[in-house]
Amino acid sequence: MATQGWVQKGQIASNDFQREVLPNMIASLPAGEFVSVEMEGLSQTSTTGVAVVLDRDCGVDHLIHNPDTGLTTTVAARVSYKTEPAYASFTIGELELTKRRRELQTQEAIGPYFTIQGTVTQPETGTFVCGAAVATSDLITFVTDFPGLVETRTNWTNGRPFYVIWATDLWDQGFRVDVKIAPDAGRILGWP
């Protein structure tokens, strides 16, 4: 039953990402057809299907496939729900950080090329508040090179640490980060 609840929350978040965050952040991404690996993986009963492995083991939530060039780009996506204040930030768990570092160290690993995080007012019916996109390699380089600017927090549901990287800190250190904010968003933490 707990797994079913987790799957349902994942499906809602993935739908909210595609419904509200993606249309607002699409200009930050390469052109192509957007494919939800996460939704495909959540619907599979196999634990070894391609979508499950890409999502669970590689952190790839979506693909952008350009049929004209044959190129495919990988994307990690996260949605949070909050109206005031919203956050222009990226969060990454300890296990995710280990995987991303492994991907940067070897040409053999698959991981998300872009990381996008967005805020929506509420699940299923909420509206876009803000979003941020960054090259995942830049995000991991920032965490490694500027540890004093990375906040460590604890996930209250499982007790595991995770890291918060503010979009403005990335920008101030010369990293390219694209931030979009809804006109009526109100205060946004992590962005001027």
Image (cartoon, grey):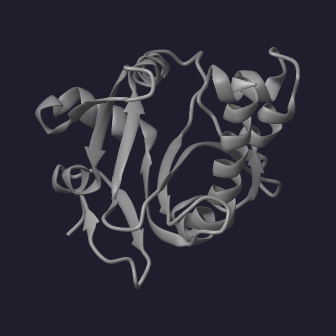
Quarter of the picture containing the C terminus is bottom left
User: Is 181 rendered above or below residue 63?
Assistant: below
Q: Where is residue 10 in the image (x, y as percent from the top left)?
A: 67, 41
- Number of marks: 0
Q: Quadrant of residue 112?
A: top right
- Where's residue 147, x and y in %? 16, 29
Q: Which residue is most to the right?
A: 45
Looking at the image, which is closer to me, 124 or 115?
A: 124
Q: In which quarter of the image is residue 142?
A: top left
Spot occupied by residue 143 in the image (x, y as percentages of width and height) = 26, 32
Looking at the image, residue 85 sits to the left or right of residue 73; the answer is left
Please, is residue 103 above or below residue 37 in the view? above
Q: In this view, does 109 lie to the left or right of 118?
A: right
Question: Residue reaching furthest left?
Answer: 148
> Looking at the rendering, which quadrant does residue 85 occupy?
bottom left
Quick check: 110 above or below 105?
below
Percent across and percent down for residue 178 are 39, 62
Residue 174, placed above or below residue 185: above
Q: Residue at x 54, y 19 (%)?
A: 107
- Residue at image position (59%, 30%) is 59
At x 63%, y 34%, the residue is 60
Quadrant occupied by the N terminus: top right
Left or right of 11 on screen, residue 157:
left
Outermost front residue: 1
